[in-house]
Image (cartoon, rainbow, N blue to C red):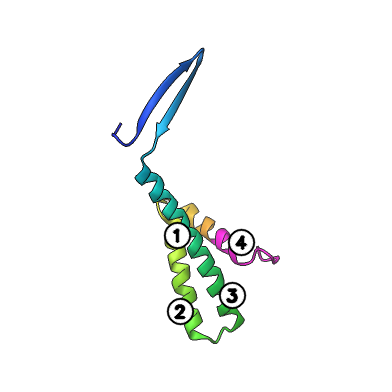
Amino acid sequence: MNDEEKLVEDSMLDEQVVTKFVSDEETLRDTVKELDLREAQIVYVNTHARFFSNTADVEANRECEAARKRLFYLFTDGCEDAAWVLKAWNQYRRRLCYHHRADS
C-alpha cells in the first residue's frame, strides 16, 4: 500500500467498512481526463457533421480524421484488451454520431 492510497477500517457491530482516501492530484487528473474526453466528443461530432454535409471539403475531412484519432486515443486510454476495445469503439462512435437515426 502506498502513501497516496490509505485504507481505513471501521467496525460497526458485525459490519466492516473500508474507506479509500484518494489524493487531490489523482482526483484532478481523473477530472481532466473526463473533461478532455467530453471536449473530444463535441469536436468529433461537429467535424463529422461538417464533413458529411460536404464530403468534397478536404479540410473538413482532415479535421474530422484528426478529431477521430484524438477521441480514439482518449477512449482507449488504459485498455489493454484490443479484442473488445475495437468493438466497443465502433458502437460508441456509431451511437455518438447517429444517435437520432436508425443507424445507431
- Residue identifier under label 2: 62
The percent position of residue 81, horizontal first and vertical second, equals 43, 50
Q: Earlier in the sequence, mark 4 or mark 1?
A: 1
Quarter placement of the C terminus: bottom right
Q: Earlier in the sequence, mark 1 or mark 2?
A: 1
Q: Which of the 4 image quarters holds residue 51?
A: bottom right
Q: Residues within 10 Å of mark 4 (few under 14, many from 20)?
A: some
> Alpha-carbon distance for marks 3 and 2?
13 Å
Between residues 78 and 33, which one lies in front from this camera angle? 33
Q: Which residue is mark 4?
A: 95
Residue at disc 1, secondary structure: helix
The residue wearing badge 3 is 49
Residue numbers of the magenta segment: 90-104
- The answer to whether residue 66 is above or below residue 86 is below
Q: Between disc 3 and disc 2, whose residue precedes? A: 3
Relative to 17, residue 88 above or below:
below
User: Where does the image place residue 48, in percent across and percent down from the top left?
Assistant: 55, 73
Mark 3 and 2 residues: CB-CB less than 8 Å, in contact?
no
Tell me, yes or no, whether the highlighted magenta stretch contains residue 97: yes
Q: Is residue 72 magenta?
A: no
76 vs 11, nearest the viewer: 11
Query: Which residue, given by chain and number where applicable, does mark 1 sit on?
Result: 36
